[in-house]
Amino acid sequence: MTTTEICESIGDVPRTTLYRHIKILLEHNILSVVSEQKIRGSLERTLSLNVTEIAKHNTLENATKTAFAFLMNKYMTFQNYFNSQKSDPAKDKIFLNNKILMATDEEFDQFLSELRDLFIKYNFEYSEGRRARDISIVSAPGEK
């Protein structure tokens, strides 16, 4: 994906902010430059995720820290929201839900496939009247 395509697909974030974040991701080897092409005097880069670098940090040893960071991020999001003078959970459709599913591995794989399809179906482009909805899903270990 080119930097221009990234900016177009995330239309609600200023270009300068995206370029700054892209630079940070490149510096930390999370993104890599696949190709460069001169377009009207500017250098257009095609970028790719550096899956190898990401996989280095996705280890069993880091799993607890990763889960904690994820959950603390959600906690801070809720804390900031509820400390805001503008928080209106009913209007903003804020909810928490927990459900234990009884499923075989095959049934759970089917569930995850259908869930992925729902995310694809409802992953709309930014446009007037739409706002970001932060949906987080955690599959935690069940008790044996």
Image (cartoon, rainbow, N blue to C red):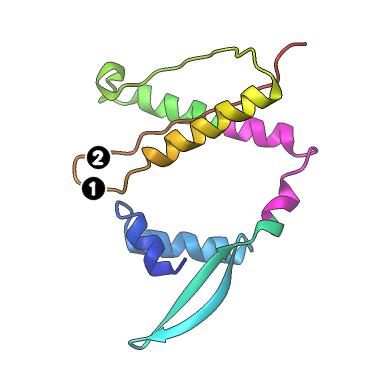
Residue of label 1: 127
Residue 143 appears left or right of 88? right
Disc 2 residue type (three-letter): Arg
Q: Main secondary structure of the magenta part?
A: helix
Q: Kindly identify the residue that appears in the image at 31 percent across and 48 percent down.
A: 125
Q: Kindly identify the residue that appears in the image at 54 percent across and 62 percent down.
A: 24
Q: Secondary structure at mark 1?
A: loop
What numbered label is drawn on residue 130?
Answer: 2
Question: To which quarter of the image does residue 104 belong?
Answer: top right
Q: CA distance from mark 2 to mark 1?
A: 6 Å
Q: Position of residue 144 (x, y in %)?
A: 78, 11
Q: Kindly identify the residue that appears in the image at 64 percent across and 12 percent down.
A: 102
Badge 2 crowding class, 10 Å Cα cut-off, few under 14, some 14 to 19, many 20 or more, is few
Q: Nearer the viewer, residue 57 or 38?
A: 38
Disc 1 residue type (three-letter): Ser
Q: Position of residue 77 (x, y in %)?
A: 44, 30
Q: Give the residue at the far left of this rendering.
A: 128
Q: Position of residue 90 (x, y in %)?
A: 28, 16
Q: Secondary structure at mark 2?
A: loop
Task: Please say if 94 is above or below 134.
Answer: above
Is residue 66 one of those drawn in magenta? yes
Bounds of the magenta span? 54-71
